[in-house]
Image: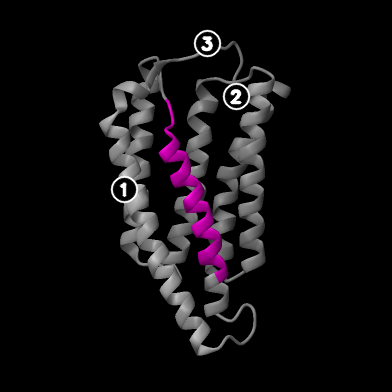
Amino acid sequence: MLHHFPNLLTFSRILAAPLLAYAVIHNAVWMALGVLLFSMITDFYDGRIARRYNLVSKTGSFLDPLADKVIIISGFSALCYSGVIPLWVVLVIAGRDIFITGLRSVVLLRGYELQTSWLAKSKTALQFIALHLYIIGSGCLHGAFGYIGFSFKLVMYRMIEATSVIVALVTLFSGLVYLWGIKKRVKPQKRSHVQK
């Protein structure tokens, strides 16, 4: 059972994505933040357990970043549907992540793995931070925390706009960096007799 546990944690993040989208669309701020917290905790422990007990495998190497992308795209798409962020931000994030996931799949099928760059990890962390900001901002703008003055709403709007541009630029840049140095990040897969 233990050798499946990291994968189950990873897969639970994928299953949590629709709940995150539902919470964002219905302005259930605390539920949405709870799902994000659950995602971050499982993201930390699935990798930690897999490395500690030598359970790393091709399945886990593919599912782990995929789960992050599913959560992030679900959250950003729901925020776009709610009118919090513009569509072009979602298209940049989804386009980059779908392309890189496809590229990772091809590399894995050929017996190699695509190592994640520090910039890609920073991009994911920034997207999660932005999700928290947007969800809290959406709650402020839609009355989840009671009456909020016009001046504070204006500040929140400007902060969301500025952060959206930053997130989109970092996302796009990290994708270009992947393509630029892809030969350095393609490595032979590490052999393992169990799945992560």
Q: Is residue 162 left or right of residue 176?
A: right
Which residue, given by chain and number where applicable, does mark 1 sit on? 172
Describe residue 150's horizontal placement relative to residue 102 as left or right.
Answer: right
Assess disc 3: are there few (<14), some (14-19) or many (≥20) residues with their C-alpha within 10 Å of its C-alpha: few
**Looking at this view, is 111 or 157 the one in front?**
157
User: Are the residues tagged 2 and 3 within 8 Å (C-beta)?
Assistant: no
**Res 6 quadrant in image:** top right
- The residue segment tinted magenta is 115-136
Q: Is residue 187 magenta?
A: no
If you read the primary sequence from the N terminus, does the residue marked by circle 1 or circle 2 appear first?
Answer: 1
Q: Position of residue 107 (x, y in %)?
A: 35, 22
Q: Which residue is mark 3?
A: 191
Viewer-proximal residue among 33 and 163:
163
For residue 127, say whether it is visible. Answer: yes
Q: CA distance from mark 2 to mark 3?
A: 12 Å
Residue receiving disc 2? 196
The part of the image, by quadrant, that contains residue 52 is top right
Q: Residues within 10 Å of mark 2 (few under 14, many from 20)?
A: many
Closer to the camera, 64 or 152?
152
Identify the amino acid type marked 2.
Answer: Lys
Q: Position of residue 19 (x, y in %)?
A: 59, 56
| Amino acid at pointer 1 | Leu
